[in-house]
């Protein structure tokens, strides 16, 4: 999850233009995607990703690799408002769920032996935390203050104890904080 220094995961009107992304970040993203068995999305993040990646023709090798992963990695979308998700030649392995089924998530995690990632969906992240389904949080703090937007853990109404596992400083000033839940 990307977050601003003042705790927002997105700016007003779902703005993400403040994210610090560069070659080092892209290499990190490729490594992370390669270790992932499935990506979980909320509706808004899914809509954004599904409209971007299948239509994006990257000029650099790193984004070609990311695009390939985004196409082929199984994706599960959680939405109460979508009736269906659509696969294309460049956007495969997509399933829709209207509610989080904790037992299904546990089963998928144990079957794959690899991590399941939640991409950019703050509401989904909060729901999964409430169900006790997240083992680890990887929070990428961007060195920017955006002033307003949506707080990273908006809707989480209980204390959550975390243990810091590691930190990594990126050359662009991003700081990756990895926590055990």
Image (cartoon, grey):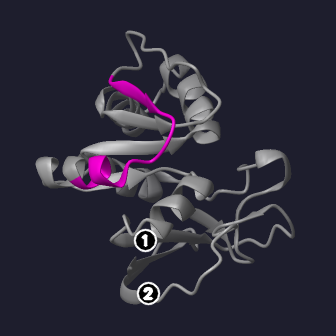
Q: Quadrant of residue 92?
A: top left
Measured from the top left, where is residue 37 in percent x and y? 24, 45
| Identity of the residue drawn at 62% across and 59% down | 20
Q: Position of residue 27 (x, y in %)?
A: 36, 53
Q: Is residue 14 above or below residue 53?
A: below
| Magenta-span inclusion, residue 91 | no
Q: Identify the magenta region.
A: 93-106
Mark sitting on residue 163: none
Q: Secondary structure at mark 1?
A: strand
Residue that numbered label 1 is attached to: 137
Q: Are marks 2 and 1 in contact (CB under 8 Å)?
A: yes
82 relative position to 24: left or right:
right
Residue 122 percent location from the top left of the image: 60, 58
Q: Is residue 1 visible?
A: no
Checking the image for residue 162, the label placed there is 2
| Residue 101 highlighted magenta (yes or no) | yes
* Residue ID at (36%, 72%): 136
């Amino acid at each position: 999850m990307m977050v601003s220094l003042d705790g927002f995961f997105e700016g007003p009107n779902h703005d993400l233009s403040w994210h610090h992304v560069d070659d080092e970040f892209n290499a990190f993203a490729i490594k992370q995607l390669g270790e992932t068995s499935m990506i979980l999305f909320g509706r808004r993040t899914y809509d954004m990703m599904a409209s971007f990646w299948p239509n994006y023709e990257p000029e650099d090798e790193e984004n070609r690799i990311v695009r390939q992963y985004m196409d082929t990695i199984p994706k599960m979308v959680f939405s109460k408002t979508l009736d269906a998700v659509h696969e294309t030649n460049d956007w495969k392995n997509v399933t829709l769920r209207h509610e989080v089924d904790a037992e299904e998530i546990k089963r998928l995690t144990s079957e794959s032996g690899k991590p399941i990632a939640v991409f950019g969906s703050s509401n989904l992240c909060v729901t999964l935390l409430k169900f006790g389904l997240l083992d680890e949080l990887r929070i990428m703090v961007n060195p920017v203050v955006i002033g307003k937007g949506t707080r990273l853990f908006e809707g989480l109404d209980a204390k959550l104890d975390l243990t810091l596992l590691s930190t990594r400083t990126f050359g662009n000033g991003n700081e990756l904080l990895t926590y055990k839940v």
